[in-house]
Amino acid sequence: MSKYKIIIEPDTENSNYWKDLWNYRGLFYFLAWRDILVRYKQTVIGVLWSLLRPLITIVVFTIVFSKLGNFKSEEGVPYAIMVCAAMLPWQFFASAFSESANSLIANSNLLTKVYFPRLIVPASTVIVCLIDFLISFLILIVLFFWYQFIPDVRILMLPLFLLLALVTALGTGLFIAALNVKYRDFRIVIPFIVQIGLYVSPVGYSSNEIYSRDIPQIFKYLYAINPMVGVIDGFRWCIMGGNTPLHIPEFIASIGISLLFLLIGIRYFRKMEKSFADVI
């Protein structure tokens, strides 16, 4: 039982909010487990959709960019592995961003009935997408065996870049989720953002295609402010080892943008949170 009382007063911030977030961790687990159970309910192949969706996209990108577009992979690395190393974090981000952005609307009945830190709702959807990512990671393992490709010790750093992808998805998802409650147009905008993001992120091509060009440095930084550039480059650096360089200045810029999105997302979400029950 909690050792303190929760007092909710009009027009005041709850000083125990972060303690409440910890105290309501049981609800966090419940919402995440509920979403896992219902995600593939009444589907024919169930959890295999976590493998099939990224696999089909990887095959299409490999054919379009490698065979038709004549894009090249880094030396010594099969093109399919290069695409997979980018598609898995992108698929995680796209799913986590979309699910968290729509999470408050999807749980509107819950928001209007009881008090709990609303941040739990979008955060729980990100965890569900993380489980999907872990399942789809099997595709990359199969490709390692198929191409007899052995990653080096850098792959041990992969959880750090996965954490960076999680931070990016949560930060942007919180911001759009708060906007989505008041402006329902964002339900239409969200798929558009994801679609555009796929093509401006280095999924089907390498960032070296950009950084090696003789263009002003400012354009390279503009490219790098897409936070998924840093995430994808980090994944490829871990998986492909010395075959792909990590451009430090641009990488630091991507990390900075990810952290900035997280701070802005939490701040705006907390600012709008007290009005969710009335507006939704």
Image (cartoon, rainbow, N blue to C red):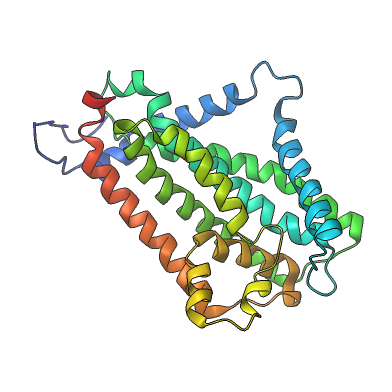
Residue 14 horizontal/vertical position (percent): 16, 40
Quadrant the N terminus occupies: top left
Residue 143 horizontal/vertical position (percent): 84, 54
Q: Could you say which is closer to the camera, residue 107 or residue 223?
A: 223
Q: Is residue 251 left or right of residue 157?
A: left
Q: Is residue 42 left or right of residue 74?
A: left
Residue 121 horizontal/vertical position (percent): 40, 33
Residue 86 horizontal/vertical position (percent): 67, 57
- The residue sitting at 59% across, 78% down in the picture is 247
Q: How many marks?
A: 0
Q: Is residue 148 above or below residue 10?
A: below
Q: Is residue 270 left or right of residue 70?
A: left
Q: Could you say which is closer to the camera, residue 229 or residue 164?
A: 229
Q: Which image quarter: residue 7?
A: top left
Q: Is residue 81 above or below residue 72?
A: above
Q: Which image quarter: residue 67?
A: bottom right
* Residue 126 in sight from this viewpoint: no
- The residue sitting at 43% across, 40% down in the picture is 123
Quadrant the C terminus occupies: top left
- The residue sitting at 70% across, 30% down in the picture is 47
- The residue sitting at 76% across, 46% down in the picture is 138
* Residue 205 in sight from this viewpoint: yes
Q: Is residue 18 above or below residue 64?
A: above
Q: Could you say which is closer to the camera, residue 214 or residue 95?
A: 214
Q: Could you say which is closer to the camera, residue 12 or residue 78?
A: 78
Q: Which image quarter: residue 150?
A: bottom right
